[in-house]
Amino acid sequence: MSNAQPDRTRSERLPGNGPAARADLIEGNNWQHPNAHSRLRRLTSHRDFAILLVALALFGFFALLTRNFLTEQSMLEIAWGVSILGILSVGMTFLFVSGELDLSIGSNYGFLLILISYQNERLGVDPSLASLVVIVIGMIIGAVNGILVTRIGLSSFITTLGMMVLLRGGANAISSGYPIPVEHSDLPFYRIIRAGFLGTPVPNMFVAMLLVAGVGAMLLATTKFGSDVYATGGNVDAAQNSGINTKRVKFRCFVAMGGLCGIAAALLFGRIGLAPLDAGSDVLLKVIAAIIVGGVGLFGGRGTIFGAIVGVLITGMITTGLILMGVNGYWDGVATGAIILIAVGLNLAIRRRVTGRIAEA
């Protein structure tokens, strides 16, 4: 009897056969020639590395064209500006990767901001305790979204669109149409949030964003839950056949998104000591633009927290850079819309190219 092994298909001969091998093919890796040139090509074709190069190029562009871009004040403005968006982008990345979305994050964030201010000023609740309350309420709101999507069977688009309108109306009802200011903003809660990290100019809010991003990146990249999120977004039927409870995975992503809305609301309240009525009105588009620019897939199964945070930094640099160039601040929305259209176009082009390469393989 011959000991010769049956010939394997090309896909089986791929190094590290499985999801990683298919990801290598999708990223354009040249696995057949592992020399220095192919390693460089592999590095530069990696999506996160490409996004980082774009961010560095944009940074250099604004540094050359605007005199004040490299000042400490400008860097701090970017850090303050991206902190809230970065935290919300972590939760949205989990949802996008799992194949879902949440259109209510702006209204949820604004509603919780009004709620924490109402507790503090009208009910006399300590702001630290009020922050914990709104984080829990945010998780409950996320859980309601998750139940409607995973148990009732509504689409995430319809569910979160309805929740967006409901929460915006709830915020107006609680505030009676007026912003709720803080009378005593000298408490440690406010001083800590407004301060720099360990005496440095780096805002504590920015450090909080990095901490949230770090935890999110670890969960998504190194844990079974993160692997289940990718599998659920990549092919929900295949994930279910593999024994993954895809409904539970998506439910947890919605809950996490709601909790992060509560954290973001508490941080902004601690910084400005006010609950403005229009809070969160432009958050949704900016978060979606940031994570799409950061390489998070529109159709699930692809994306990283690192890419999302780099995308947030890119949008922050564009906002600050345009202002320093003398562009009217109202054009910020135009820039955000253009970013979304360009990023979606590139996303679809890459997807078609990947599909063609897989078909050839």
Image: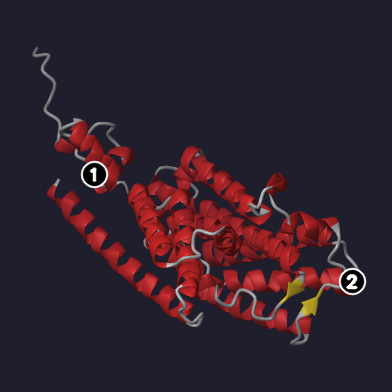
**Residue at the far front in the pictured view:** 67
Label 1 crowd (10 A; few <14 / some 14-19 / many >=20): some
Residue 299 screen position, x and y as percent? 37, 61
Observer able to see residue 301: no
Q: In this orientation, which residue lies closer to the viewer: 201 or 221?
A: 201
The disc at residue 12 is: none
Of mark 1 and mark 2, the one earlier in the sequence is 1
**Closest to the observer, 86 or 303:** 86
Pick the quarter of the image with the C terminus. Answer: top left
Q: Amino acid at mark 1?
A: Leu
| Quarter of the image that includes the N terminus | top left
Q: Is residue 121 shown to the viewer in this render?
A: yes
Are the residues tagged 1 and 2 within 8 Å (C-beta)? no
Q: Which mark is residue 123?
A: 2
Residue 101: x and y in percent read 48, 65
The residue furthest left is 2
Residue at the location (16% across, 34% down)? 32
Please state if 276 lies on the left or on the right of 317 as rendered. Answer: right
Q: Position of residue 87 (x, y in %)?
A: 58, 57
Question: Which amino acid lies under the numbered mark 2 shown in the image of this protein?
Answer: Leu
Counting the numbered discs, the total is 2
Residue sitting farthest toward the right = 124
- Establish if 154 lies above or below 259: below
Residue identified by numbered label 1 = 25
- Identified at 55% across, 49% down, the residue is 213
Label 1 vs label 2: CA separation? Answer: 58 Å
Q: Is residue 27 left or right of residue 221?
A: left
User: Quick one: label 2, few (<14), some, or many (20+) residues within 10 Å?
Assistant: few
Q: Residue at x 78, y 86 (%)?
A: 176
- The spot of residue 239 in percent (x, y) is 40, 48
